[in-house]
Image (cartoon, rainbow, N blue to C red):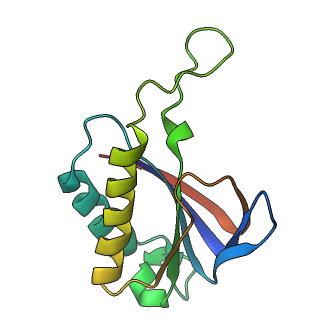
């Protein structure tokens, strides 16, 4: 399982087909979540516990010393199977490492559930939907976590 995190001032999702807004957050973390074949709920639990506790927000001395909990931030989660693109051969990416759709959906939804269970204000995209992601990057701060 892989999570690409971006610290944001704000982020929102719209449906590509209609332009309808789906979800919006203020200060927080945009999480692009990729599920790999063989990933388990244990990996979901590890990532969902770690992400809101990462000290990636600045304190009064401009040091990254505060967590999402400390700053009262939110999380926006977007399914992103393309994080498992294999581009080693040719020019067309292969997605053979990405989990099949229904198994990935279950783990994606469990990830969101675990964040909410911890009291993290969490919004999400629609699994499998083509979306437009709009964000105001803060820093920029971008991290990749892989379990």
Visible residue check, residue 98 = yes
Image spot of residue 84 (x, y percent): 48, 34
* Residue at the image position 69 percent from the left and 14 percent from the top: 91
User: Relative to 94, does residue 57 appear above or below in the rendering?
Assistant: below
Left or right: 137 in relation to 113: right
Image spot of residue 125 (x, y percent): 57, 65
Give the total number of marks visible in the rendering.
0
Image quadrant assignment for residue 13? bottom right
**Quarter occupied by the N terminus:** top left
Image quadrant assignment for residue 100? top left
Image spot of residue 69 (x, y percent): 40, 86
User: Relative to 46, does residue 123 appear above or below in the rendering?
Assistant: below
- Name the foreground residue: 117 vs 131: 131
* Residue at the image position 33 percent from the left and 73 percent from the top: 113
Left or right: 132 in relation to 79: right
Q: Residue furthest top?
A: 90
* Residue at the image position 77 percent from the left and 72 percent from the top: 20
Visible residue check, residue 1 = no
* Residue at the image position 44 percent from the left and 80 percent from the top: 68
Q: Residue furthest left?
A: 42
Image spot of residue 128 (x, y percent): 55, 51
User: Relative to 17, does residue 20 appear above or below in the rendering?
Assistant: below
């Amino acid at each position: 399982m892989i999570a690409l995190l971006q610290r944001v001032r704000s982020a929102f999702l719209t449906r590509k087909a209609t332009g309808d807004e789906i979800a919006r957050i203020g200060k927080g973390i945009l999480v692009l979540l990729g599920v790999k074949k063989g990933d388990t709920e244990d990996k979901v639990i590890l990532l969902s516990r770690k992400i809101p506790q990462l000290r990636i927000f600045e304190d009064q001395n401009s040091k990254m010393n505060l967590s999402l909990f400390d700053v009262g931030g939110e999380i926006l989660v977007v399914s992103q199977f393309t994080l498992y693109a294999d581009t080693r051969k040719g020019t067309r990416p292969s997605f053979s490492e990405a989990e099949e759709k229904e198994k990935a959906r279950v783990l994606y939804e469990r990830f969101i559930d675990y964040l909410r269970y911890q009291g993290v204000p969490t919004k999400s995209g629609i699994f499998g939907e083509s979306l437009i992601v709009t964000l105001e990057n803060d820093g920029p701060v971008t991290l990749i976590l892989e379990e």
